[in-house]
Structures are given as C-alpha cells and as structure tokens.
Image (cartoon, grey):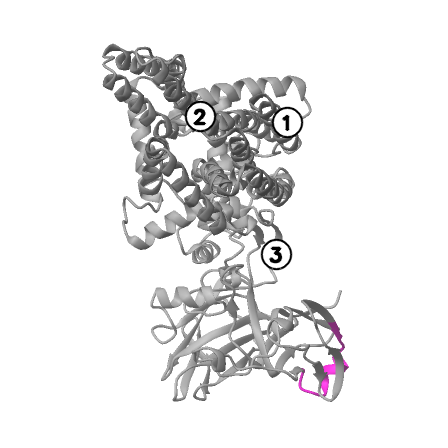
Amino acid sequence: MTRRANIVVTVIALAFAGLHAWNLPRTLEDEDSVNFALGVENFSIANHQPHPPGYPVYIALGKVSNAVLTRIRPGWDRDRRAASGLALWSLIAGTAGIWALWWFWSGLGLPPLVALSATAASAAAPLYWFTAGRPLSDTPGLVSALAVQAAFLHGFRAQPESPDTVPRLWWWAAAGAGLAIGIRSQTMWLTLPLLGFACVHLVRHRQWRAPLALIACSLAGAALWALPLLWLTGGPSAYIEALSSQAAQDFSGVKMLALTPSWTQLQEELTLTFAEPWRGVGWPFVVLGLAALGTIRLVWRRSETGLILALAYGPYLMFHLLFQEVETLRYALPFATLTAGLAVVGVAIAGGRVAMAATAAGVVACVVSVQPILHEYADGAPVFRGLREIRHAWKTESSPPVLSAHHDPWWGTARAIDWYRGTWDAMPPSFPGNRESLRLVRHFLNAPPRPVWFLADPKRHDLARFDPRTTIHRGTWLLPPGSETLIGGRRHYEFSWWTIDPPFWMLGTGWSLTPELDALSVADDRTPLREPAEAFVRRGAGPARLMVGFRHQADQSARIALTLDGRPIHTWVTAPQAAGVEWIELPQGIPDGDGMYATLRFSVVGGDVRFEQFDAAPATEVMFALAGGWSPLEKERQTGQLLRWTTQESTIEIRNVGKPVRLELNGESPLADFANPPRVLIWSGSRLLRRLAPESAFSVEIPLLPEDLASVDNRVTISVDLARTPAERAAGRERRNHGLRLTRVAVVPSR
C-alpha cells in the first residue's frame, strides 16, 4: 500500500508541477516581491533589499535561479526574469511539499489511504495552490517547515523502539529548523517548539547530553546563513538597527491584535485566518466543521497527537494573530494545508474509500476554481501592468508631468518605481496623506501649469473636484476576478491612471459632488452651513457660464450668495426641502487678477444646503445639469461604483445646443428591483426619442439635434412606469420613488 501511495503522490506532484510551470508570473507584485528581487540583484538589508530580517537563504536561491534564467531565457525582460526566478522556487517547493505533506500526515499515524487523501487535499487547498505560483518566500518557508515537522513526527514514532538512542531524523530536523529560518523567519514558530519537545522527551529518558547536541545542531544550521548575513550587513549593530527600523514600521502601519486587543478583532482575525482562504470555493464552514471533527478524532484516538499538533501550530497561531497583518491571507498558509488535511480525517470517519472519493471531488472543485485565477494572475500584477504603460507614455512626453497618487496606490507603486530606477526618471511622489485631491488643487493654484498624472484608487471618486474636460481616464488595472479571495488585504493595489491638465475649474472644500466629497466636508466640519464652499475658475475675457446643483435639507428657505474674488455677483433663495439647479451667466468672463484662477465662494444663510453639481465653461461649450426628479448620488460599498436613481420622471437640462450632441445612459439591470422590465420612455417635449424595456444592464446613446431641444427649453425627460420607495422597505429619509439605477448620465458633443 505504501509503495502504491508513493506512486500516487508522485503523479500528484508531477501534475502540480506541470500546471504551475506554465503559469510562472511575468511581473513582480507587491513591495515584498520587489524587495526580494532587488535583494537578488544587490543584497542590502539597510536599503530593504530585501526587508529585514533578510531571508538570506531565499535570496541565495533567487540568485541561482536568476542566473539560470538569464542563460536559458535571454529574451526575457528584467521584470519577467526577476518574477519567474523567484516564483520558480515557489513551484519547486510546492511540488516538493506534496512529498512533505505525505510524510507529515503519515507521521501523524494516519492509515495510508487517509494520509494519501489528506496529502491531495492539502496540496489542492486554494491558498496553497495559488501561493505556489507567486514570487514570494511563503511556499518555500512552509515546505521547509513541513519537512522538519515530518522528520520530528517520524522520529517520535521510531524513538520508543530505541529509547536510549536519538533518532537519526532528529539530527536532520534540528539542522533544518535552523536553516529554514534563513528562508523565512516565521518558520521558527512551526519548528522550534517541536525541537524543544524532542529535547524534553530525551531528558525524560535520561539522555542529558543529546538535547544540547540537538540544539547545537540547530544553531549550526542557523549559523550557515546568520554569519554571512551579519558580515554583509556590517555587523550585529547595523543589523539590529535595520531590524528595529522594520519593526517600528510594522507596529505603526499594521492593524494587529497585540496593539488593539478586542473580542471583535479576534473574531475577525480568526475568520480571516481559517474561513477566508476557503471562501473562493464557496464552502469554508463545511471545511472547518469537518476539520474540527477530524481534530477530535485524532485526539480521541491518541491524546499525544493533540499535543504535537498544538506544539506544531499553536505558537505560530499566537504569533500570527497577535503580530501579523492577518488581512494578508498568505500568512495563513500553514493553516490552509492543516485544515484541508484535518477535514479529510473528519470525512474518514465514514471510511477510507469514502474519504478518497470525497477528497477527489474536493480536489477537482478546488483546482477548477483556482487554476484559471492563477493563469490570469501570471500575466502580471495590476501595479506592474499599469506602470509598464505609464513608463512607455512617459518617454513620449517632451517635459515630465507631475506624478501623484491616492495613498493606497502610493504604497503599492512607490517601491515598484524604485525597481525601475535607472531606466525611468520618474520620482515617487511624497506620501499624499488622506486629502490627496485638495493637495492637487493647491498644486494647480501655486505651481507653474504642468499636467498631473494621477494614480487613483478605483473605488474613490474625489477627482470629481476637477473639470472633467481636462481629467482624462487612461486605464484601470484590476486583479483577476476571484483572486482577491486568495490575496486579501490591500497589498494588491489596484489603480486607475488619470491625466489632469490644468483645468478650467476645480473645487476646494464644502462640496458634495460625490459621497466621498460630502463625507470629507462633514469630517472636516467644512460644510456650507459652516463656511462658504470654494471653487476656482480660470481667468479669461470671453463670456462664461456657471452651473450649480443644490439640495436643501432644512424646513425653512435658505439664501445663497456667490462672490467672485470677494465681489458679490449673484444671489438666490431656495425653497425648503427642495433640490434645484442655478445657471449663472458671466458675459464679461472671469476678470484678471492675482494668479491664474479666480476664487468663487458660495455662502449659505438659513439652511442646510449641499452643493451636488458644479460646472463652469466658456459660453461656447456644451453644459448639462440634472434638473429635477433625481436622487442623490450613491456609492456601492463593495465595488465603489457610483450610481444615481431616476424617479418616475427625471429631467436633464442642456445649455448651448448649437450643434449636435448625444445623451449617454448606462444602467444596471432593473430586474434586481422589479419582477418585470420597466417601460422607459425618453422624451424631448412631446417627441419620443427612445423607448426601452431593459431586462439586464444596458448602455444607450441617443443623438440630440438642436431642433429637438429648442422648443422645450433644452430639456430631456426620462419617464419610468415602475418605481419603488426605499422608505417602505428600510428606515431612512429617502422618500422619493426610485425607477432606473444609472451608473452614467452624460451629454457630450457628437463624434
């Protein structure tokens, strides 16, 4: 049976290696992988090449694979060679790990059929399968720890037969425990407790010198990498200084249980550790329930097994929950393989053959769900795919633009830009804080007129502060669907690239064009109720036009006054609980003065007013406003998508239609809210422009000629025959009927 099992394990390993070999990554990914790649090229812990504690054995392996790939794949660029060179060791370790898993589970005393099933399940665990294709040290570190653990386990099984001798495997395990720390420092929490238990076991059998010899063997394994590491770093003091710096960063930038202990956070971390890595296949709590059953079965049959599992994984669990960034799911890799194997032990209560059949079905389900994600992810991480295009465009610019970013993309791209140092002269922007768009406003007000290239979080929408005519979306780079369930955290750094030329207008504080801008105004206590909302408009002599959309939320009327560079130019009064649009004509344009931009201030007296729309342009430009029958803009929590509801009748008002334009509408499926498709009619006065009955997400473009709008005061009306009132289904202030859910409403000049 053991011989047959070894054949099956070999087949599984070959299949694993083959499916991963064709999916080596073409780029690096987060800052850890960049640190490793920089360390392979030029080892310097002080410069985080790689980051402390150093990973010297892993870096040495990376140097070997990089040299090999340089020779056999000379056509690969630096990005692909670095990423594939590191990921190659994840592949090799992941493949070897199948034998280590087989050795581990059989070392626990499982019958061959059950041990074989546990091995297959552990190898197919989504987190293990996916991480074995990444250019990181997690898989090599785990597999080295598994090999050490398995050696200790088999030694425990053999030792009672020769109680007066030290099992030969323990010498290898002790040396391996010390050496493995040089691959990944966290392995010490998986291996050293078992080393300590072996020493205690020997003392109980009155072997006094053997424990000291085992410890010396482990120290010798550690010395193989520790002494060169200290020498290359500049001595113990320099190394401790670098390590202390890294620790300070970790403790200041990571949410960890040790710093903010609470029952809620503990629950969240346990969910992220044990359930989240299985969420992609849809049944995390089934796996966890079976794993709990398997643990009880093992402990019931042999109490010492429970102690061994507690020593092998308990210390790492404590370290993981207290001090690691639990949101980064790869840190939970040891528990993914353990949980998978224990789940098989739970199923095996029904028999070994049942366990094999259930395992085969689970393995197929896991591989089918994860392999396409691994294949897509191999094309490159979002940060590097995006930066490649940006670098190419940068080289075509006559003068370099200003590079800026939201804080999340900043964390992800700053180190990646360091990777390109010497081939790209872009300077990483300084840390932008949490009011990034306001920082850009100050840039355009105070600096010479240079375009800005902005790396934006795709779920944020504060760039609505800037004139959309000069704010151009150049691309968005996202993770492959489903991969976020195997990566977790915020280290994948999806981002969008926007170019912002010096705008005709931009907004300061006090605006609510998007939910994010509204929340910032409230958080900073700078709503129009507290102080005037500010806008900045480029100076020029030609006629100009302003549009302001507002929503009044109080029960009394309010007065709104507009000043231009401190001079009153317009005043109007709003009705209670009303929304509307105010158009302001400036026949003389924006007068000359200090600076490129004039300052507009909108002061409110007597009510709580939110300014939800703004536009300004020369009088020759097309402008539009959502004039009546529209709900406030909303943001979907999960996707960050902005959307706006129509009511049963919603109006769009358009100005300066002296040439053909088109109305663009994108919407989500109405069948998410209604049992039947609504009838949607789009009118210009009494003329029907388009009839719709959408049954799914839709996108329409409707051409509008000047004569279509002239007779109806430049208005288009959208009517919907079905609507619902949110207040009838959930508590809230929103009482208007909701009809269509639109993700885009725009009027633009015809092509």
- Residue labelled with disc 2: 107
Badge 2 density bin: few <14, some 14–19, many ≥20, Cα 10 Å:
many
Q: SS class of the residue under badge 3? A: strand
- Between disc 2 and disc 1, the foreground one is 2
For residue 150, say whether it is visible. Answer: yes
Snapshot quadrant of residue 608: bottom left
At label 3, the amino acid type is Ile
At label 2, the amino acid type is Gly
Snapshot quadrant of residue 540: bottom right
Q: What residue sits 33% from the left and 31% below the top?
A: 304
Vertical arrangement, residue 502 with respect to residue 336, above or below: below
Whichever of callouts 1 and 3 sits on the residue coming sooner in the sequence is 1
Q: Along the horizontal axis of the image, is 461 left or right of 650?
A: left
- Between disc 2 and disc 3, the foreground one is 2
Q: Along the horizontal axis of the image, is 276 left or right of 646?
A: left
- Between disc 1 and disc 3, the foreground one is 1
Q: Position of residue 84 (x, y in %)?
A: 59, 28
Whichever of callouts 2 and 3 sits on the residue coming sooner in the sequence is 2
For residue 490, say whether it is visible. Answer: no
Q: SS class of the residue under badge 1? A: helix
At label 1, the amino acid type is Val
Q: Where is residue 646 in the image (x, y as percent from the top left)?
A: 59, 78
Vertical arrangement, residue 143 with respect to residue 645, above or below: above
Residue numbers of the magenta segment: 702-715
Snapshot quadrant of residue 654: bottom right
- Residue labelled with disc 3: 472
In this view, the residue in front, 219 or 633, is 219
Residue 712 lies in the magenta stretch: yes
- Residue labelled with disc 1: 11
Mark 1–mark 3 Cα distance, whole angstroms, equals: 52 Å
Residue 57 lies in the magenta stretch: no
Quadrant the C terminus occupies: bottom right
